Amino acid sequence: MENNSSTLVLFSGDLDKAMAGLIIATGAAAMGKQVTMFFTFWGLNVLRKEQYVKTDKTLVERLFEKMMPRGPEKLGVSNMNYGGLGAWMMKKVMKKKNIATLHELMETARELDVKIIACAMSMDVLGITEAELIDGIEYAGVTTYLAATDESNHNLFI
Amino acid sequence: MENNSSTLVLFSGDLDKAMAGLIIATGAAAMGKQVTMFFTFWGLNVLRKEQYVKTDKTLVERLFEKMMPRGPEKLGVSNMNYGGLGAWMMKKVMKKKNIATLHELMETARELDVKIIACAMSMDVLGITEAELIDGIEYAGVTTYLAATDESNHNLFI
Amino acid sequence: MENNSSTLVLFSGDLDKAMAGLIIATGAAAMGKQVTMFFTFWGLNVLRKEQYVKTDKTLVERLFEKMMPRGPEKLGVSNMNYGGLGAWMMKKVMKKKNIATLHELMETARELDVKIIACAMSMDVLGITEAELIDGIEYAGVTTYLAATDESNHNLFI
């Protein structure tokens, strides 16, 4: 086992949890670690393109599509969201204090070669297609995630 | 330390989080790992028998019993549950696409010898008795969980 | 890497999750492990002093301050809180059964030399000042957290 790698499952689609995950991931990558992020269930919303993508879906899949936020800018916070007020407050403070936004953290992650994997099975459950997600990511299942944990002592579920 | 084992604390009683935990646990077990799942707090609801079990409880314990879901079929989702709509939607899609239910994942976990431990202390806090939980599981405390992590590089809290 | 250390990120400010984290942390420390707890985002509320501390803040920071619970006694539970009913029920049962409160667990953690770090960046985001947090803790960023994980096989995000 190498001590030099980290894996993070991002299950949550909350702005604050996604930020915490990306701050840890980019921090670890900046320290020279090999980092794998596995986006599953609501975490897939972090990977959604902001623009609408025309797709062919069942009614239930269409419902999920409408109900789920499209990309980092639309996410709520896990606590005190109050219909978006909490997320707005957090983004307002972060802008004022020059703290990187989730969108910027995602870009940094990619520059630092963090491996970004979308969970194929939960895409299937939520009816999310590859065309709806940002470019340049991988699609894989739990076996790929587990293989990455084999080489890592630092594995988080967020 | 062996690289060949995983531990998962299942704290959450949400359908989607329990599914994520079981998919990781059964995936790891299928790859030959020794997997320990420690069900604590709301995660204990995953282990509840579906049928009503007559017990002798205090008023507060009885309140917890009434308020908490009884087994995998009754769990809500962590996000967009809307009084059960989200859970219903998720189960509908999964059935259509032949994705294993939580109940089936639990059976697979047991066939693959995943060690299932119910946290004795949180049973005490929530007033849950052994008679209310499914058969063939172990009852233990945090020391037993921590001993299992000693042999594992892959430890998640869900 | 040493097998003899644990790290826990406490992101959540929920009573039940904080309790789970502290039970694991104090259990590990009692078994002779070096334990580091990194309190970030809502987890910082666990470290807040109960009494009001006069501070100079912006309007948004003041809003966060008013909306967030001050210390262990004020936290809600992650599930079935119902405006504090769930937290009240849980504390009532714990008292009756002589289970350690969150406040007592924090004291035990300090007696067992659990390293308690408040995340400087999320203090900045939420506008929390050092004067508002309990004494005798450290202030640091993600790099300090990541350095601690280097020496640990057991790393949780709660």
Image (cartoon, coloured by chain):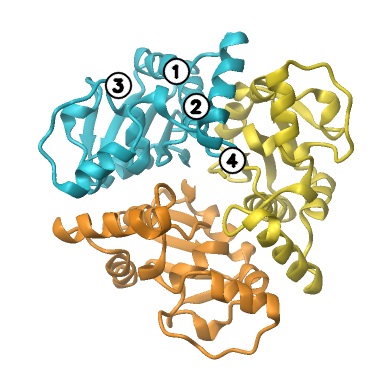
Chain colours: A yellow, B cyan, C orange
Whole-angstrom CA distance, mark 1 to mark 4, is: 31 Å
| Neighbourhood count class around disc 3 (C-alpha, 10 Å): few under 14, some 14–19, many 20 upward | some
On the same chain: label 3 and label 1? yes
Measured as percent of width and height from the top left, residue B21 is found at 48, 31
The amino acid pointed to by label 3 is Glu
Vertical relation: A52 (above or below) A153:
above
In the rendered structure, which disc, 3 or 1, sits on the residue that comes first in sequence? 3
> Which is more toward the observer, C141 or B116?
B116
Residue at the disc numbered 3 = B50
**Labels 2 and 4 positioned on one and the same chain:** no
Camera-near label (3 vs 2) is 3
The residue that disc 1 covers is B105
Q: Amino acid at mark 2?
A: Met
**Same chain letter for marks 1 and 4:** no
For disc 2, the marked residue is B19
Quadrant for the N terminus of chain B, please.
top left
Taking B5 as reference, is A90 left or right?
A: right
**Callout 1: residue from which chain?**
B
Label ID, residue A2: 4
Question: Viewer-nearest of labels 2 and 4?
Answer: 2
Query: What separation in Å lies between label 3 and label 1 (alpha carbons)?
Result: 16 Å
B79 over C3 or under it: above or below: above
- The residue at 20%/55% (across/down) is C93
Query: Between disc 2 and disc 1, whose residue precedes?
Result: 2
Lateral position of residue C112 relative to residue A23, left or right: left
Q: Amino acid at mark 1?
A: Leu
